[in-house]
Amino acid sequence: MKTTSQIAIIAVMAAVGVGAWLLKDQVLGKTTKQGAAAAPAVLVQVKPVRVGTVTERIEAVGTALANEAIIITAKTTGIIEKINISEGERVKAGQMLVQFDDAEAKAELEAQKATTRGAFLAYDRAIKLIEKQNVAQAKVDDLLSAWKSSEGRVKVLEARLSDLKLVAPFAGKVGLRRVSAGALVQPGTIITTLDDDSIIRLKLSVPEGSLANVKVGQDVEATAAAYPKRVFEGKVSSIDSRVDQITRAAEIRADIPNSDGAVKPGMFMAYKLVLSKRDSALLVPEEALLAEGARQYVFVVADGRSLKREVKIGDRNAGEVEVLSGVKAGDNVVIGGIQKIRNNSLVKIISAVPAS
């Protein structure tokens, strides 16, 4: 009797255990299936691919040079009689800058002119006498030589006298004086400088790989530290015929109007040289890019799914990147929530930033 009761109890417990296991399996199975079906979509922010203008440019630092620049030096030994300029003065072409003491040179020139006049008269008399055969031809030839030699000496003295007056070879601005009136100077002594700064020639250096896109007449924009809010505009005026063998770059000159003299020769200037413009470029925000090694990807949202696409990028421009392939205009690319999605993820757009 006791044994029969124990067996019955065990049988009931076994039945209850099997029922509980079956119930748990059904409940868990339903939960798993319902959970997979109801997986929430990833919230993302998107922005459409837009068509815009991409400007390819070189940005670097160049040196401002004067359009014309010389150092005024003495040509001969002498005493400075008068300095006819003030520091920082603007002068015209041909204007006298410095006058040396020329009293001795003038006296020597006058004496030589008198000698030349006498040589000419002697030759002239000999010419008249030779017609009457009262003088030998050799004598006439000697007198002619003496006259021409004396004339040459006059020209030498006139050139020496002109060296005692320094004039401006072109219009420009005078720099600081290095000497004073009354000073005895030697050939090569620096007196002052002269710069034509009406046009600034900006000296640029362009890598050889970009030379094919550089042409005379291209626009250049430059700024100087002294005028941070001012943009100086100019154009490429010349391109060097050689590439430096060490830097592998060519020197470029750009002319910038400087009528107010704001830019001083020797200044550093940050410049932008426009190489090319593309008006129909496809642009995406920089934050849309996902880098994997050397490759770049974006996620495009279509039909509620994220599609991973490899793209080839071009130039960067003000927070945007030019895309050469992989997307088309109007495609919605993910710019927010990109780290939470994978290819073919279920997504929900919470914010669409309009194309600017």
Image: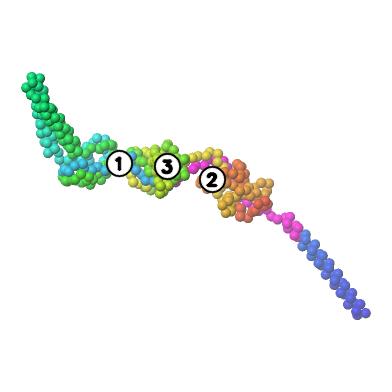
Asked if residue 22 is among those painted magenta in the image, a careful observer would answer no
Label 3–label 1 contact, CB within 8 A:
no
Point out the image quarter for the N terminus: bottom right
Q: Quadrant of residue 166?
A: top left
Q: Which residues are magenta?
A: 31-59
Alpha-carbon distance for marks 2 and 1?
Answer: 42 Å
Label 2 secondary element = strand
Work out whether mark 3 precedes mark 1 in sequence or the reverse, and give the earlier one.
1
Q: Nearer the viewer, residue 318 or 310?
A: 310
Residue wearing tag 1 = 69
Residue at x 52% of width, y 46% of height = 316
Q: Residue at x 29, y 39 (%)?
A: 172
Q: Which residue is mark 2?
A: 314
Q: Position of residue 201 (x, y in %)?
A: 36, 41
Measuring 62% from the left and 48% from the top, which residue is drawn there? 309
Sequence-wise first label, 2 or 1:
1
What is the secondary structure assignment of the residue under circle 1?
strand
Q: Residue at x 67, y 49 (%)?
A: 305
Asked where in the image residue 133 lies, by quadrant, the reply is top left
SS type, badge 3: strand
In the image, what residue type sits under mark 3? Glu
